[in-house]
Amino acid sequence: MQPEKFYYDNKIVRNFGIATVVWGIIGMLVGLIIAMQLYKPEMNMGNQYTTFGRIRPLHTNAVIFAFVGNAIFMGIYYSLQRLLKARMFSDVLSKIHFWGWQLIIVSAVITLPLGITTSHEYAELEWPIDILITLIWVVFGINMFGTIFKRRERHLYVAIWFYIATFVTIAVLHIVNSVELPVSLTKSYMVYAGVQDALVQWWYGHNAVAFFLTTPYLGMMYYFLPKMANRPIYSYKLSILHFWALIFIYIWAGPHHLLYTTLPGWAQSLGVAFSIMLIAPSWGGMINGLLTLRGAWDKVRDDVVLKFMVVGLTAYGMATFEGPMLSLKQINAFAHFSDWIIAHVHVGALGWNGFLTFAILYWLIPRIYQTELFSKKLASFHFWIGTLGILFYVVPMYWAGFTQGLMLKEFTPEGILKYPNFLETTLRIIPMHVMRSIGGTMYLVGVIAMAYNLARTMMQGSLVANEAAQAMPLEPFKKSDTELAWHRRLERKPIKFMIISLLVILVGTFVELMPTLTISSNIPTIASVKPYTPLELQGRDLYIREGCSNCHSQTVRPFRSETERYGEYSKAGEFVYDHPFLWGSKRTGPDLAREGSKYPDAWHYNHLMDPRSMSPGSIMPDYDWLITQKLDTSLTVAKINAMRTLGVPYAPGYEKVANRDLDKQAKGIADNLAKDHIKVSSDKEIVAIIAYLQRLGMDIKANKTPEK
Amino acid sequence: MFKQFTENIDGDQVYLIASMGIFVVFFIAVAVLLIKLRKKHVDYMSDLPLEDGALNSSNTLTL
């Protein structure tokens, strides 16, 4: 049998590489802007499209799906071809995948600042874009499996298992967390409500970290690290254990994002238990990576690529140790909602994802351009300023998290809250936020230096668009080769492998999601909880549009420090009409679950127009456009109908009179404001959002009144 | 540290115990797989990234 000659497609790798760098700079720049908004409200730039609530999702989406996403595809398209000794299945599909993915990102860049969002974290994009993501993901899948089918290497290396698990799990996560009922082209409601929606969202959110930010990167680590160090992985057996244990356990850990909420206790306990178990496979993987460099540590001193890998792997180890610690209830009690979480995710994002991406770019670009890196000195500068940038970023954030977390829980000897005004704790951590943005700037400067370095490298070399290679064709599998080891058999059966991976991730998914989604006794109803009025519903949609839940939670945990500060702790039954849930994950401002009737309408009016007029020193942006913009009531009928379809008990035919009720309630609020000498016409957006804010927590208060 | 797991389960221990059971079975299954692997195969798999068949690279080319 003669060896076959074929060509690796390097152009698609290069294209994803360029997209990685360009979107990386944009995503990090947006991150820097929002970081500065947290101590200088003027950085919101005085218009609605660049306020924190709208562009914080732009930052997260850009770094996760644009920067990391493109880097994943760069790494997969390079390594998959070489591990399988085959060109990608279809050049056309590669191109559709590349341009389709960029189109998704551009759609996000346009829609998120416009306030078109589902409010589900890292899944903010509205339903038409969700469909596009599904289609492009399928294109990627066909291209990957097509390549696997025409391979010249019988056995699939561990990196490819991680890619397969990524593909199948992200597909499941994306579909389940995007089941929305469209109201218009740019608006939809989640089919799940309240606690159920929260569970689905954090099952998704946690596993987006697992299967988008972790498994594809582990696959890339298992391919690129041996290449970079020119030695095989430390233990292949450990990598098998790492793979199966990681994908099995990760899927269960989502509920640790919902500790002390109204999620059933058993689901919280499961989340904690599996989070702790996660240390084992995570550290197994990190150790496997670091030990691959055994005997090659002298290379680490000279080779900037290996330096990036070592710090990246160390950051992975730190983040995956910290994650389980944060899921312990006692620690979570004050770390959750605080800047500690921001520090935690940035150890992972800047250290693990960022540094691995940089290492791969520095290693791969000169190779496909058949040249040397333009400047090793500049790459070394990038390494040091990047490492220092991470430290300057995370240390102040830990400090801010501890400070604010402890302040919010502190009582005086007399038993009253020491810092009853939330703002006092915010102002205390502003210096840390300033430091954080300096760290972020340093990191970004490093990335820009890399962009320049890589651009010069590309200019001095020439792209080998089609790299010649040869390998023996795959012989038909002979029965006489029967393999005893089951796993060895599995390594040459990609579809079976995918199905088994799918089953493994579905175990945890079913045990956790099904009882909460199907057993009604898990969510005790409360008779006094009524559907939102049409005006409140519209106000709620404005709250979603402005991204208020990026800074304000809506769930009071059962701690004295919270019930004293906000009011009665939240009950599952309060959220049964909340499509979607709006619990939030970060308290940059106070919780709003009990906001209703706390302040008069006029306070909210003035506070939204200029927060500093009511709360001196507040870092909340002005929302003055709410006063001038007219509320769009053209969708009220469709919204009421959609909510009824989802099970909200609006009376039959109510949609016909909904706008009449809306006008009536709005007029009441406008009249109330007029008493405080505020002239505003009742058809403005601010009236709707005041109606919503004044409704928050009122059902429970109504429930209490008769008992007294 | 472990008190929270045993005390805060609200009578739903069955979920916790069943999932731990599933995990233990799963873990043992993977361990058995690993034990059954032959060294020759493990070495072969470990070397896969280092042999990519490219004609112009410095990597060893084994056909």
Image (tube, coloured by chain):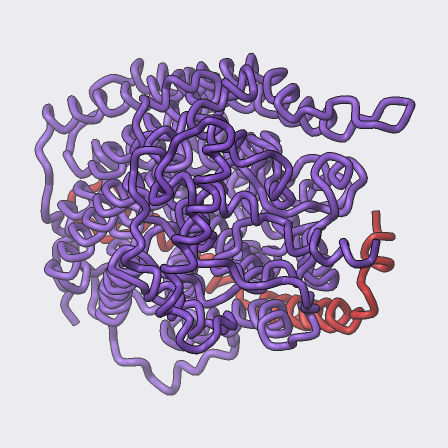
Chain colours: A purple, B red
**What is the total number of numbered labels drawn onto the structure image?**
0
Q: Residue A335: x, y in percent?
A: 67, 35
Please report the residue visible at 14 percent of the width from the left and 68 percent of the height from the top: A2
* Residue A322 appears anywhere in the view: no
Picture quarter with the C terminus of chain B: bottom left
Q: Is residue A444 left or right of residue A418?
A: left
- Is A435 on the left or on the right of A80, as rendered? right
Q: Quadrant of residue A475?
A: bottom left
In the image, is A370 to the left or to the right of A245? left
Question: Which x, y percent locates residue A575?
Answer: 59, 59
| Residue toward you, A362 or A417 | A417
In the rendered image, the residue lying farthest to the bottom is A479
As drawn, the residue found furthest toward the right would be A414
Residue A472, picture quadrant: bottom left
Q: Residue at x 39, y 53 (%)?
A: A663
Residue in the image at 18% along x and 54% along y? A100
Q: Nearer the viewer, residue A378 or A603?
A: A603
Res A378 → quadrant: top left
Question: Does the image show residue A281?
Answer: yes
Residue B25 at x, y percent in the picture: 69, 72
> Where does residue A32 sit, x and y in percent of width and height?
38, 23
Residues A56 and A289: in front is: A56
In the picture shown, does residue A26 fall above or below A150?
above
Q: Nearer the viewer, residue A600 or A26?
A: A600
